[in-house]
Image (cartoon, rainbow, N blue to C red):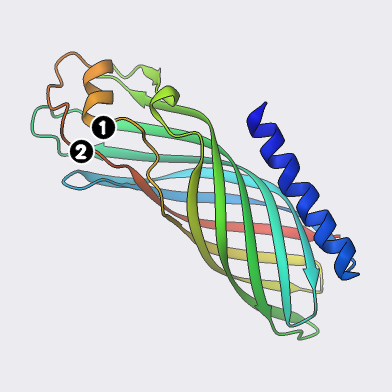
Amino acid sequence: MKRTLFLTLIALSLMATTSSAGLVPSYGIKGGLNISKINIEDIESSTQTGYVGGVFMDLGSPLLHLQAELLYSNRKSNLEGFSTTTYQVEIKNHYIQVPVLAKFGLPIPVASPSVYLGPEVSIPIKSQMTTVDGDWVDVKDFNKSLVWSMIIGADLKLMDRLILDIRYDIGMSTLNDTAVGDILDDINDEFTEGESYRDIKDRTFSVMVGWQF
């Protein structure tokens, strides 16, 4: 209920801003791939491919404009290199994400490039880790209810409709409320380093294709 209220307040604030500024927004859809990697001190990790998709609203002048998005995002990563075990830990996270991006673009008729940056709030929907036996275990209760990150990216609009988008999502806050070692110790009996490996932050490249109506 709190998460729904939070998203509703964001949407109402954006609509109020649009109305007061006298701007006519445009809307669109986008989707593509996430290439994610978990960042934890003293633990090696490898990238995995997930998916992302959703809707966006864009408003402003041809040169400077604001874009708000509502995305569903799946991010994956592998953890390895623990001193007490040799198995590989797989992680899957699902989020509702709300980026608010400031964009600077060049209104070239055929192909209009833009660069952008801005904050993003993510609400974890589902989070899982693998056990030694390869079973998936729900660890969402160990995570924070809101996660903040910063987005830097660029896009190219073709024929005023088709959008090619690439971005880098830098996690600014940790994903977990509980030490990683404690989480692993809870789901795997042979893992005994409960005080180690505390903070989880992720880094994600996203490549998307969109269509603006």
Q: Nearer the viewer, residue 2 or 57?
A: 2
Give 208 or 84, whichever is nearer the viewer. Answer: 84
Q: Residue at x 35, y 16 (%)?
A: 135
86 with respect to 129 (left or right): left
Furthest-left residue in this view: 83
What's the mark number on residue 179? 1
The amino acid marked with disc number 1 is: Ala
Q: Compared with residue 64, is residue 207 higher up or lower down, i.e. above or below? A: above
Is residue 83 shown above or below 33? above
- Residue annotated with mark 2: 197
Q: Position of residue 101 (x, y in %)?
A: 63, 64
Residue 35 in sight here? yes
The image quadrant of residue 115 is bottom right
Instruction: Classify residue 98 as left or right of residue 149.
Output: right
> Mark 2 and 1 residues: CB-CB less than 8 Å, in contact?
yes
The 10 Å Cα crowd at callout 1, few under 14, some 14 to 19, many 20 or more, is some
Quarter of the rendering occupied by the N terminus: top right
Q: How many marks?
A: 2
Q: Position of residue 148 (x, y in %)?
A: 49, 50
Q: Residues within 10 Å of mark 2 (few under 14, many from 20)?
A: some
Left/right placement of residue 146 relative to residue 102 reads left
User: Against 119, is 113 above or below?
Assistant: below
Which structural element holds mark 2? loop
Give whichever of discs 2 and 1 has the lower sequence position: 1
Q: Amino acid at mark 2?
A: Tyr
Q: CA–CA distance between discs 2 and 1?
A: 6 Å
